[in-house]
Amino acid sequence: MIKITIDGQILEVAEGTTILEAAKKIGIIIPTFCHHELLDIIDGAACRICLVEIEGAKSLAPSCAIPVTDGMVVYTDSESVRSSRRTVLELLLSKHPLDCMTCVQAGKCKLQDYCYQYGVKSANFNNDDEKLDKPIDHTNQFYYYDENKCILCGKCVRVCSQLQQVGAIGLSERGYNTHVAVPFELKIKDSTCVSCGNCVSNCPVGALVPKRKEKFRYWETNKVKTTCSYCGVGCQMDLLVKDNKVVEVQPSDKGLANNGLLCVKGKFGYRFIDHKDRLKTPLIKKEGKFVEATWDEAYDLIASKIKVAKEEFGPDSIAGFSSARCTNEENYLFQKLFRGVISTNNVDHCARLCHASTVAGLATTLGSGAMTNSNFEVLNSEVIFVTGSNTTETHPVIGSHIKQALKRGAKLIVAEPRRIDLAVHSDIFLQITPGTNVALFNGLMNVIIDENLQDKEYIEKNTENYDELVSVMKDYTPERVAEICGIDAEDIRKAARMYASVDKASIFYSMGVTQHSTGTQGVMSISNLALLCGNIGKESAGVNPLRGQNNVQGACDMGALPGDLPGYQKVANPDVINKFQKAWGVELSNKVGLTVTEVMTKGSEGDLKVLYVMGENPMLSDPDINHVKEALEKIDFVVVQDIFLTETAELADVVLPAASFAEKEGTFTNTERRIQRVRKAIDCIGNSKPDWEILMTLMNKLGYDKVYSNASEIMDEIASVTPSYGGISFDRIDQEGLQWPCPDKDHPGTKFLHKDGKFSRGKGLFKPADYIKSAESADKDYPYILTTGRMLYHYHTATMTKRVEGINRLFPHSYMEIHPTTANRLGLEDGSKAKVSSRRGEIITTVTITDKVEEDVVFMPFHFADGAVNYLTNSVVDPTAKIPEFKVSAVKIERIKD
Ligand SMILES: Nc1nc2c(c(=O)[nH]1)N[C@H]1C(S)=C(S)[C@@H](COP(=O)(O)OP(=O)(O)OC[C@H]3O[C@@H](n4cnc5c(=O)[nH]c(N)nc54)[C@H](O)[C@@H]3O)O[C@H]1N2
Ligand SMILES: Nc1nc2c(c(=O)[nH]1)N[C@H]1C(S)=C(S)[C@@H](COP(=O)(O)OP(=O)(O)OC[C@H]3O[C@@H](n4cnc5c(=O)[nH]c(N)nc54)[C@H](O)[C@@H]3O)O[C@H]1N2
Ligand code: SF4
Ligand code: SF4
Ligand code: SF4
Ligand SMILES: [Mo]
């Protein structure tokens, strides 16, 4: 420890602490423009506002760059310091427009604040205001750059290159004309800018500013800390609210999930909240048309339809889709309504289309179907293996963390059919044919075993069934696997050695692994690989299924699954049923319910009477839309509870308007198992209500009297019946979320799972599988493989993102990525229309020519209603997990003549 004196106060700090950091520890805040805790320190500092006086030194020193030394005596506010700061400010102000009165940044501008603090007025010097007429750069859809106001601190450039890891901007030219070369000047399409807005959030002045409609002053806004409602990263953000309207979003200061970063959806994608299309009142369909109804009319109709169906056809004629967009409390109540009040286990949700194979596969091999590590742990991984996850687009903040790890020296292996951003940054890229994961993973294990690279001690101590693994892997020589996957055998060897050679290797995977008819085998093969090398149960090493939706982890944890009560307690287990019967005071069914995919089959066969859909849009998101439509039309009574009138809602009999995440209290559980708060920022739009209130009222109408006065009470009930959430309460997670398992109120939560080879199932289980082909392969009628997925800017069925102007302007309609050679062969040009057909349907879409994909593979995102790709996808499912094969369908492509 080092002893120093700052402004007369003596303190001890660790070696390497800067003066700035040391001062902060005793509450002395030294002004800064260019400093950021997570950025490299610039020698000599760029902005020089943080200079301080060190006793005995000849000149003032930049406090952000100088580490403390023993006995150092520092003055942070002496006259020479103040005078130097005034000079810096005067210099800046001499080149700065003096329009603080009308500047949108007023109240959040450090220049303005410091000038006030140090008594610097424009009258003190000559301001050359006239020269400040450089044009404002509006190229980006979401923010603009006002060069006139830029103080050239360089912070945005460093944030972009060091934290976001994109490097889209730099300081260009020298002298008077120096400015930030923001994406800007280039068309957005040619720029590498991903519109994350992290530069904007960090600009200390009004130079990088969000484009916005509302006029407001920062001091007029309230900050409400909450959790992003898009993807599973679970970013912590502040909603800035003025007059009951969210007017801006900023990353929260604190938040372990995201370290102060956001992506474009979190930062700029909030416009859906008060979009005019929000559902504002219940709707009941009469003679084919929706008419507005009161809540009571809607509740009574739903309750009576449920009662009649239950009496006439039994409770299993009713099914419900819960929602990974909704809170834990809402998912808990949804399954309680179905199980406890309606008496059926027919409750499922989009996890079926997503990580069902993870839940099934990892529960079998490791005992728990969740990410083993924490988001930030990747920063210290030595080798990172990313497969079937387009991380920088779908979990963007984790994507940036992966790239930060690469900068720190980590090696990256990517296995994927497309040359995604991470593939470009990888050390080894295995561009595999869609549907060949199991072969690839087996090939890697073959090499590891063959070359004796496995962790024998770990295997011996902590695993079961190793001999079977060895025997199955024998056949997967690199040469054979190379042939199946369409890659180079030597690359397989290199990748296997790279993965096996280090102590801290982590695997990240997502839909490219799970959404196959062999999804469960793919997942189990990944855990085989990790167990084989003992690369699990450690910080920065493990198996990380990136959970997709904001609360898909939570929806699964809460038992929105047909075979699982909250906490994965099985409905087939009589002790579990007893426990819940006692807790809820009701009779429960022990018959495993229907999955999403089975509901559609049963529905189309006319065997379902009522379907209740909360926060899902299967008319765009389920495979084989023609089949979904048939099912929804055949089911007697369909309820949709959503925030917008979706394609699914249009087919419903009753539509209930739900409140969005900005209008309610609750919790989401992110991909790293962290349970975080969602907070009400504004009043419910129109007559909409929080989902939990709707579900509670419906329960009450159906004769179950329990009343909850708020979401916190529901969490208390959750904690009382769910062992892994036993220690969770709203009080405890007020400041920072906790990671499950957190079994009691003194438990600190769990950063990483399976420590010291301890698995909740006992030992880690090797479950080898042989490679089986996808249900469809390219043939003479359908000669191309279509794989589907997502892109950065849009989210799922785009109910929210298509209502964000900037996003919609950038990507208004569906498109298909196709290789230049293939396009050429088919006579297609970039931007031309093509007809794409499969055995199930056909669509028309726009062609994007790119060598990201290989010649015989095409890719389409499923976000768009026009040219909806799920007309083409195959509803064949994995027999264990019942997840559909979204990632492989055979299609034919034809040019459409204009
Ligand atoms: N911007 C954005 N982010 C999202 C979402 C969104 O809609 N938009 N959705 C969220 C949700 S719910 C989810 S589940 C996640 C999904 O996140 P990801 O799984 O990352 O997204 P996908 O684009 O579906 O698929 C990932 C990659 O799998 C590749 N792939 C296709 N076939 C195969 C294969 O056979 N093997 C391998 N190894 N790879 C293959 C695709 O080329 C694609 O790049 O994203 C979440 N985040
Ligand atoms: N071809 C293809 N299809 C796919 C996939 C793929 O990779 N390829 N991926 C699959 C995957 S992984 C997933 S997770 C699914 C996602 O499928 P869905 O869950 O059906 O898709 P979303 O668009 O997220 O639907 C969520 C709905 O909830 C609404 N909503 C938002 N917030 C709230 C709220 O607070 N309350 C209520 N009641 N409603 C709310 C939204 O408006 C939206 O209509 O899609 C699957 N479909
Ligand atoms: S928005 Fe993000 S990617 Fe674009 S310049 Fe700013 S930090 Fe870089
Ligand atoms: S745009 Fe803002 S953050 Fe970037 S250099 Fe200018 S003042 Fe600094
Ligand atoms: S990374 Fe995910 S959670 Fe974070 S801001 Fe983007 S969409 Fe939201
Ligand atoms: Mo998902």
Image (spheres, helix red, strand yellow):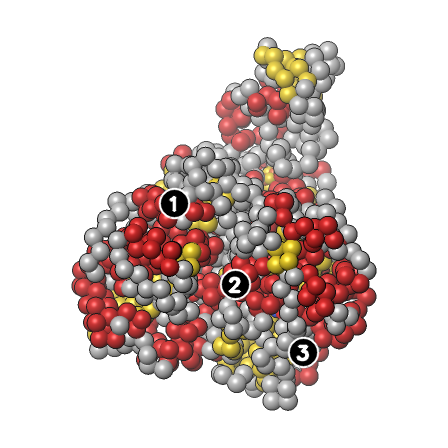
Q: Is residue 812 above or below residue 162?
A: below
What's the amino acid at mark 2? Ala
- Residue at 61% in and 12% down: 10
Q: Is residue 823 above or below residue 863?
A: below
Answer with mark 3 or mark 1, whichever residue precedes in sequence.
Answer: 1
Instruction: Where is residue 389? Give x, y as percent.
Output: 61, 60
User: Alpha carbon of mark 3 to alpha carbon of mark 1: how far?
Assistant: 51 Å
Residue 804 visible to an observer of this rendering: no
Quadrant location, the C terminus: bottom right
Q: Element under label 3?
A: loop
What's the amino acid at mark 3? Asp
Residue tagged by mark 1?
719
- Mark 3 vs mark 2: give the one in front: 2
- Residue at 71% in and 38% down: 175
- Residue at 67% in and 50% down: 461
User: Alpha carbon of mark 2 to alpha carbon of mark 1: how far?
Assistant: 24 Å
Quadrant location, the N terminus: top right
User: Alpha carbon of mark 3 to alpha carbon of mark 2: how far?
Assistant: 32 Å
What's the amino acid at mark 1? Ala
Q: Label 1 neighbourhood size at 10 Å, few (<14), some (14-19), many (20+)?
A: many
Disc sitting over residue 856 in the figure: 3
Instruction: Where is residue 717? Give x, y as percent.
Output: 33, 46
Q: Are marks 3 and 2 in contact (CB under 8 Å)?
A: no
Disc sitting over residue 360 in the figure: 2
> Viewer-proximal residue, 238 or 612?
612
Quarter of the rendering containing residue 732 = top left
